Amino acid sequence: MTAAAVTGAGLRSDYTAAARRVLRREQAPYLALRLLAAPPLVPYLVSGLAFMNLVDDVAEQHPDRLPELGERVAAALGGGRSADPVLRAYGHAVRTRGLPGEWVTRFLAGAATAEAGFSGFGTEQDYQRYLDAYSLPGLVVFSGLQYEGGPDREQAEGLRRFVDAAQRVDFLADLAGDLAAGRLCIPRERLAEFGVDRAELEQGRDTAGVRALLADQRGRARAALTAAADVSGLAAPGLRPVLRAMTELMAHQLAAVERAGPGALRRDVGYGVLAPLRILARARRSAATG
């Protein structure tokens, strides 16, 4: 916080509360930021991640509270009082870094529509609209803080490629848990294309159609990862090691999904423990040597 010129005991306490919230929920991204990002960026990015998680949680657990949350966010961004230290820290980060408020507005709107009202994707185009309405703004309210004044058009397009890859890998890795929770994140047109019905997926059946469907989805995720390979070059220099490490983590997780095959229908596929630590250590050594 000293490197980021975050001064004042109260403000530093707010940023600390935001960091603790992230650490409880997203250990891998938190460690990547702390170990790899330039120190002047860390408090701002951590507060952005805490804010993104807060909105995600409200949209998933209490969607009826999103309008009230939107009012509290608007007050915090405008410099008004807030009882929530996460919103106080995030409001300060947005004002300090000059992130355009339209990204926050888009994210909150997407939380109330695309996410809170999520009923699956009928088509690939439905998925693309979900990315634009919710996933991309959700990434920008966090990672957009790396840029003074927010991302330009080329940077925003790069972030969209990155979040497309991240979303596709995440949907595959969390397939079992999502199905158990009543969420199907594979477009229904793909199920029809391979002659698979939802019950087969929910029951974790290993059929030729299911294997072909999952192979198709893994191939799309792999192509999205390839398309996002250049995104670290569009990042602020102080965040490039983080994006390279996160891309490598996604590739590692996708490889684990590929090895799991239809087993991914019965159990979520995590990062594991040792591989993320090795990836972060390697990235830290690389960043230290330039």
Image (tube, rainbow, N blue to C red):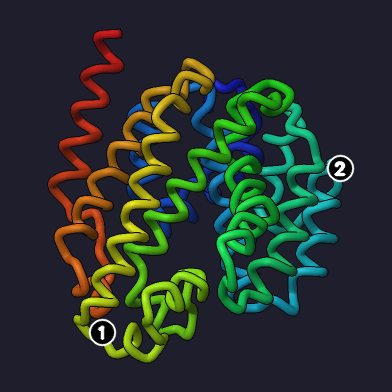
Q: Residue furthest top?
A: 290
Q: Is residue 233 above or below residue 187?
A: above
Do we see residue 205 in this rendering? yes
Q: Return the residue nearer the eye: 133 or 10.
A: 133
Q: Is residue 282 left or right of residue 39?
A: left
Q: Return the residue nearer the eye: 95 or 29.
A: 29
Q: Is residue 113 left or right of residue 71?
A: left
Q: Return the residue nearer the eye: 71 or 276.
A: 276
Reading the chain from its start, which is encountered first: label 1 or label 2? 2
Give the residue number, with chain letter if any, for mark 1. 204
Could you tell me residue 141's position as x and y percent? 65, 43
Q: Is residue 92 above or below residue 175?
A: above
Q: Secondary structure at mark 2?
A: loop
Contact flag, marks 1 and 2 (Cβ < 8 Å)? no
Quarter of the image for residue 264 reads bottom left
Circle 1 or circle 2, nearest the eye: 1
Q: 10 Å neighbourhood of mark 2: few (<14), some, or many (≥20)? A: some
Give the residue number, with chain letter if any, for mark 2. 78
Residue at 21% across, 35% down: 279
Q: Amino acid at mark 1?
A: Gly
Q: Secondary structure at mark 1?
A: loop
Could you tell me residue 161's position as x and y percent? 52, 39
- Distance between the Cα atoms at labels 1 and 2? 49 Å
